[in-house]
Amino acid sequence: MGYEVCGSDISEAMLAQARKNLARFNVDVPLQKIDFRELPQHFDRRFEAVVCLSTSIAEIPGMVETIRAFNSMHKILCDGGILVLTQGTTDKQWKEKPRFILAVNRKDFSRLFVIDYFSRGARYNIVDIFQGKDAPALKVWSIEYARILLRDEYERLLQAAGFRTIDFYGTYQFEPYDKEKSDRLIVVAHK
């Protein structure tokens, strides 16, 4: 698409999956094993955008480390650059605390979240159901988030990290984020 892109992750397994996905589409993107709290130590250049998807911020242990990650992302952005963060846990979900969420439901694959909520965090027990004669029938796994950030906390922490403007969306069509109705939280922070 005409963009120069590079990728990083702290997990070797995620990098391996990314390499597989890139190879499937014959796309060459350099990937490195990097903790996103330490980006300036690994990149000697600035970027127009940093993208961090799917609640990975919630895996950071504590607020001090979260601000450290946001500072790290801020430092590698050009002036006017943007940070894009996304997550499926929203103010609406946190208020309602549904136990079950059907996240994906296709002909060949379904994913069900069975959620245990804690005071500020949650455990997502994930049930992957594969349909098809050559696929395993069921895979169950879980991930625990010590602290789920919601809209107001994102705003406070990103401002503390030096971002000047922060926009919140509820869909990828740029519909404004609504704490009572939105099923996705998309944050766009401007340096």
Image: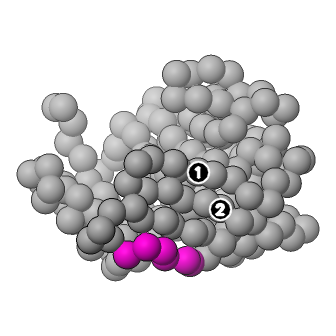
Residue indicated by mark 1: 103
Distance CA(mark 2)–CA(mark 1): 7 Å
Identify the amino acid type marked 1. Answer: Ala
Scheme by which the image is coloured? one colour
Q: Which mark is residue 14?
A: none
Q: Which residue is pictured at 56% across the width and 78% down the height?
A: 141
Snapshot quadrant of residue 70: bottom right
Q: Is residue 98 left or right of residue 107?
A: right
Where is residue 54? Give x, y as percent.
54, 54
* Vertical order, 25 against 119 (above or below): above
* Vertical order, 184 against 111 (above or below): above
The answer, for residue 67, to whether it is visible in the render is yes
Q: Which residues are magenta?
A: 136-141
Q: Which residue is pictured at 30% across the width and 58% down the height?
A: 7
Residue indicated by mark 2: 113
Give the quadrant of the N terminus.
Answer: top left
Identify the amino acid type marked 2. Answer: Phe
Where is residue 119? Give x, y as percent.
90, 68
Q: Secondary structure at mark 1?
A: strand
Residue 43 on the magenta segment: no
Within-10-Å neighbours for mark 2: few <14, some 14–19, many 20+: many
- N-terminal of the pair, mark 2 or mark 1, is 1
* Vertical order, 6 against 80 (above or below): below
